[in-house]
Image (spheres, rainbow, N blue to C red):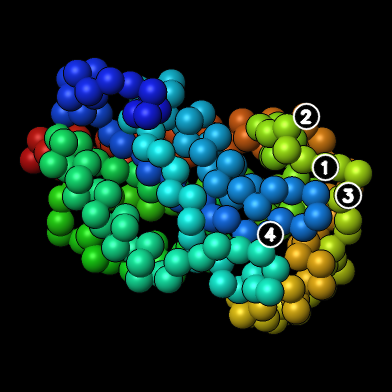
Amino acid sequence: MRIDTRTDPVLRQQAGSSYAIVPVGSIEQHGPHLPVSTDSDLVTAVAEMVGSPHGFLVMPTITTGVSFEHAPFFNISIRASTLSLVLEDVCSSLYSNGIKYVFVINGHYGNKKALEMFAKNMQGDKPIVRVFSYWEFTGRRFDHAGFMETSLMLAVSDNVTMSKAQKGLDTSNMTDEEIADIKKISTESFPRATGNGVWGDPRHATADAGREMLDEITQNIQQEFQRQIRGFKNNTTK
């Protein structure tokens, strides 16, 4: 349940018995065919699909993340320490409204350092938080504006211009060591690693493939959330 569509009485009534989901995305280039909101759009869709069937409270997406590595291509970025503090404040505010458990779903790889910092700072505090990156719940090798991410966007958004899709960095014939080396370069300069800002080949992406991936991702996340919730309940009864 998205909280931005609900009223105060409804939220106050449900908060004490609810779990919250906080999606975190980014504003950054995704090649010539995807909007800069791609990470935020996808993590929002995942959060809503995961949360709605179970009545979880889905927070508005934090759309600005840590994307400095995409310069000089377009990005709007905040420091990792800033994102960590924002999340800490959001979770503290949720707790003051009666929410004891918060799931943070990440949609951008560059946010991982900030989220690790946030999770460490929240240890022992309230609410109890768990942090996940949604692409970790698929067996596919993730990309950036490639087949997978473009297919996902075709499934959830009308803002995809397939006529402008271009093949980017192709790692299919690289060794694991070579891919690891390229990843190191990409964390400092994604344009230098990829050339055109695309990691993968989006030209044959389809909405059907995207919907299949979304189903896999959301089902796996739902299963993990239920496992975490069972753990929460077991701890409270001890």
> Disc 3 on helix, strand or loop?
helix
Mark 1 residue crowding within 10 angstroms, few (<14) / some (14–19) / many (20+): few
Hey, what amino acid is under mark 3? Answer: Lys
> As shown in the figure, which amino acid type bears the numbered disc 4?
Gln
Residue bearing mark 1: 161
Quadrant of the rendering where the C terminus is positioned: top left
Do the residues bearing badges 4 and 1 touch, measured as CB atoms within 8 Å? Answer: no
Q: Answer with mark 1 or mark 2, whichever residue precedes in sequence.
A: 1
- Identify the residue position indicated by label 3 in the image: 164
**Mark-to-mark CA distance, 1 and 2:** 16 Å
Q: Position of residue 201 (x, y in %)?
A: 85, 55
Percent position of residue 18, x then y: 25, 29
Q: Which mark is residue 208?
A: 2
Q: Which badge, 4 or 1, comes first in the chain's sequence?
A: 4
According to the picture, the residue beneath numbered tag 4 turns out to be 29
Rendered location of residue 20, percent (x, y): 31, 36
Mark 2 belongs to which amino acid? Asp
Do labels 2 and 4 touch, CB within 8 Å? Answer: no
